[in-house]
Image: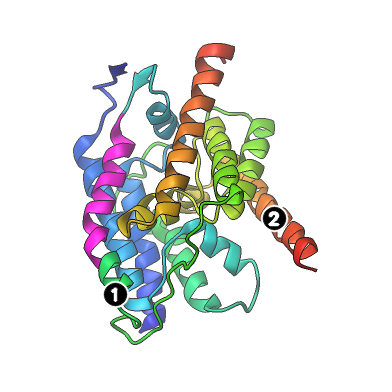
Amino acid sequence: MSIDWINFTPWTSLCGGALIGLAVSLFVLANGRIAGISGLIGSVMQFGSEGWSEKALFLLGLLLAPLLWGAFSVLPEIEVRAEWPTLIIAGLLVGLGTRYGSGCTSGHGVCGISRLSARSITATMCFMFAGFATVYVIRHVVGA
Amino acid sequence: MIKLSAFFAGLIFGLGLLLAGMANPAKVLAFLDVTGAWDPSLALVMGGAIAVAVIPLNWARKNKQSLLGAPMQLPMKRELDARLIGGSLVFGIGWGIAGICPGPAVAILLTGHGKIIIFVLAMLAGMYFFSLLERRRTA
C-alpha cells in the first residue's frame, strides 16, 4: 500500500465530511428523517408517497448545490474516465443494489453507522469490500 | 419551516460533497484502489460526517418527535438478510466500476457532464426496475 500524498486532501475532505454530518443532523433533528440519498430518490419516484415534498426539496437542494458553489467559486474538477456503456452498467447496478440493500454511502455509511445500526455497519462493509475488489480486478487483474 | 429545513439540509449536503472532493469520480476510485496509489480522503469524509452526526442521530433514537414536532422516522428492520448483503455487494460493484454513488450523482448532475446524465438515467432505471420486481413479488 502506498499513499498518494499529492492528491490526498485531508483538511478539505474532513471539513466537507463535517458539512455532510451537519446536513444529515439537520434533516433528522428538524424533519425526523434519515438523509439516505438512494432511499430519498426511490420515494420521490413514487409520486405522492409519504413525505414526498420534503424529500423532493432535500433532493432539490442537493441538485442546486453546484450552482450555488459555482456562483462564488470555481467548481471542482469532475473526471469520469469510464465510457458510456460502462456507465450504463454501473448505473443499473448502483440503482438496483442500493434499493435491494436499502441504502447507500449516505444512508448506511454515514447515518446508519452514526446510529450504530448493525444492518448499516454490515451493508457498509459489504459495499466497501465489493468496491475495493471491483477496482482491484479492473485495474490490477484485467489492467484496464 | 419543515420544507425549508429539508431544502437547506440537501443544499448543505451537496456543498459538503463538493468541498470534500467526492464530486469527482476519479478521486473516489483512487480511494477504492487500495493496492495502487491510494488516496485515503474518502475515509476522512466519512469520519468527519460520522463525528458530527453521531450525537444528533443517537438523540433521534431516543425521541419520538423531531425538534419541529415531526414524527421521528428511523428504520425499524433489525435482521441481516440476504437482500441487505446481496444488494450492498451489487451496489459496491457498480460503485467500483464508475466511482459514482447516488449522492454525488445528484450533486453533480447540473454541472452538465453528459456522462453523469447517462449514469443517473441508468441508476433511475435500476431503481425503477427494483420497484417493478417488488410490485410483482408482493402482488
* Percent coordinates x, y for residue A24 in the rendering: 34, 63
The residue drawn where x is 26% and y is 59% is: B53
Residues A58 and B34: in front is: B34
Image quadrant holding the C terminus of chain B, namely bottom right
Q: Is residue B14 above or below residue B116?
A: below
Residue A45 showing in the rendered view: yes
Q: How many marks?
A: 2
> Which x, y percent locates residue A22?
26, 61
Can residue A143 be seen in the rendering of this structure? no
Q: Is residue B52 magenta?
A: yes
Residues drawn in magenta = B40-56
Secondary structure found at label 1:
loop
Q: Is residue A109 above or below residue A4?
A: below
Residue A6 drawn at (x, y percent): 25, 22
Main secondary structure of the magenta stretch: helix
Mark 1 burial class by Cα count in 10 Å: few <14, some 14-19, many 20+? few
Q: Residue at x 60, y 54 (%)?
A: A99
Read off the residue under disc 2. Answer: B130
Disc 1: which residue: B62
Q: CA distance from mark 1 to mark 2?
A: 32 Å
Q: Is residue A71 left or right of residue A104?
A: left
Quadrant of the drawing holding the N terminus of chain B: bottom left
Q: Chain of mark 1?
A: B
Nearest the eye: B38 or A73: B38
In the image, what residue type sits under mark 1?
Lys
Judged left or right of residue B70, residue B44 is left
- Closer to the camera, B129 or B2? B129
Discs 1/2, front: 1
- Mark on residue B8? none
Marks 2 and 1: in contact by CB < 8 Å? no
- The colour scheme is rainbow
